[in-house]
Image (cartoon, helix red, strand yellow):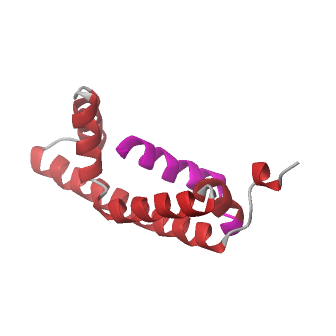
Amino acid sequence: MSNKAFGVRCDECGAILRDLRDPVQRDEQDLKNRLHRAADASGREPDQMRIAWVSSVASAPTDEMHTIIRAHYPRLADLRAKQAEHESRTGHSVFRDGWQTMNMPYEELLKVMRVLSAIR
């Protein structure tokens, strides 16, 4: 039986995953700050603004929704290409193998995966 099904320890996978996690966190903080400023400017509560924004994005056609979300995570495009190249070259999964290498909390892994799947 191959060990590959259970993942491998790969420092490069861990580095790429870390490189993905950090900009996701920075971009999300930037988005929160923009929502708070927009809420302040419009006289709304931040939760009201967040609900309005999410509803607006969710009601957009799928391609447009992905474009909108990508625009709010500008730091990720080059890293996605790096991830794809590494996975293609090695057969590794950056998420599976990087998570094991980094000992990243599972909740952080899910957050990165959620964002990346939303921006495709």
Q: Nearer the viewer, residue 44 or 81?
A: 81
Which of the 4 image quarters holds residue 44?
top left
Most distant residue in the right direction = 1
Helix, strand or loop: magenta stretch: helix
Residue at screen point 48% across, 69% down: 19
Figure label count: 0
Judge left or right: residue 117 versus residue 8.
left
Q: Position of residue 34 (x, y in %)?
A: 22, 56
- Image quadrant in which the C terminus is located: top left
Q: Is residue 84 left or right of residue 66?
A: right
Viewed as shown, does residue 21 lie left or right of 6?
left
Q: Residue at x 66, y 68 (%)?
A: 102
Q: Nearer the viewer, residue 93 or 54?
A: 93
Seen from the viewer's position, the closer of residues 36 and 91 is: 91
- At 63% from the left and 63% from the top, the residue drawn is 98
Q: Quadrant of residue 22?
A: bottom left
In the displayed orientation, state which residue is furthest to the left: 41
Task: Give the percent coordinates (x, y) of residue 4.
Answer: 76, 54
Is residue 107 in the magenta section? yes
Q: Is residue 55 above or below residue 82?
A: above
The image shows residue 26 at horizontal and vertical percentages of 37, 65
- In the rendered image, residue 22 lying in the magenta stretch gets the answer no
The image position of residue 79, as x and y in percent, is 41, 64
Residue 81 to residue 120: above or below = below
Magenta range is 101-120
At a point 29% along the width and 35% down the height, the residue shown is 54
